[in-house]
Image (spheres, rainbow, N blue to C red):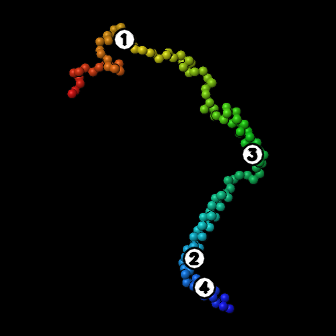
Amino acid sequence: MSALKSANKELKGMMKTVKIQDIDNLQDEMMDLMDVSSEIQESLGRSYNVPDDIDEDDLMGELDALEADMGTEAEGVPSYLQPDTESDLDSELNLPSAPTGQAAVPAGRSNAQAEDELGLPTVPRASLRG
């Protein structure tokens, strides 16, 4: 009997420190979490109109065929990244090579103008402002 009295006294002391509002808030939070969990489960369990009678062996056969198609490309490098096997375009177009050295002066034109270090005509002193 004394054990029940002491337990009752302890329980009453503990009940004074318990706030009912805190328990209600905790229950509300738990319900919100359960709602979110059920929404996630519904999203994960959604059906995408995949027929139920799909044969896994057929799917594996298609996957093997896709892998075989990919294997025909050289060492896993896509065809658009592989080097050209065609002849060089410059030889097909028969373009002349780029000139080297200084250009020759046409016959009717004299090279009386001075040039700067870049090979451009120098600016006359009279046109400089300063």
Q: Name the residue type under label 4.
A: Glu
Dot 2 falls on a residue whose secondary structure is helix
- Return the residue at label 4: 10
- Label placed on residue 105: 1
Q: Nearer the viewer, mark 4 or mark 2?
A: 4
The quarter of the rendered structure image containing the N terminus is bottom right
At horizontal 60% and vertical 70% (from top left) the residue drawn is 30
Q: Which of marks 1 and 4 is in front?
A: 4
Q: In this view, does 58 lie to the left or right of 26?
A: right
- Return the residue at label 3: 59
Mark 3 to mark 2 CA distance (whole Å): 53 Å
Q: Which of marks 4 and 3 is in front?
A: 4
How far across and down, in percent of the image, does residue 66 sit?
71, 39
Name the image quarter holding residue 92.
top right
Dot 4 falls on a residue whose secondary structure is helix
Sequence-first disc among 1 and 4: 4
Mark 3 to mark 1 CA distance (whole Å): 75 Å
Sequence-first disc among 4 and 3: 4
Q: How many other residues sit within 10 Å of disc 1, few (<14), some (14-19) or many (≥20)?
A: few
Q: Eyeballing the image, is 106 above or below 128?
A: above
Q: Name the residue type under label 3.
A: Leu
Q: Name the residue type under label 1.
A: Val
- Label placed on residue 23: 2
How far across and down, in percent of the image, does residue 18 sit?
56, 80
Q: Eyeballing the image, is 95 above or below 30?
A: above
Whether tag 3 and tag 1 are in contact, CB under 8 A, the answer is no
Sequence-first disc among 4 and 2: 4
Sequence-first disc among 3 and 2: 2
**In the image shown, does 27 or 69 lie closer to the viewer?**
27
Q: How many other residues sit within 10 Å of disc 4, few (<14), some (14-19) or many (≥20)?
A: few
Mark 4 to mark 3 CA distance (whole Å): 67 Å
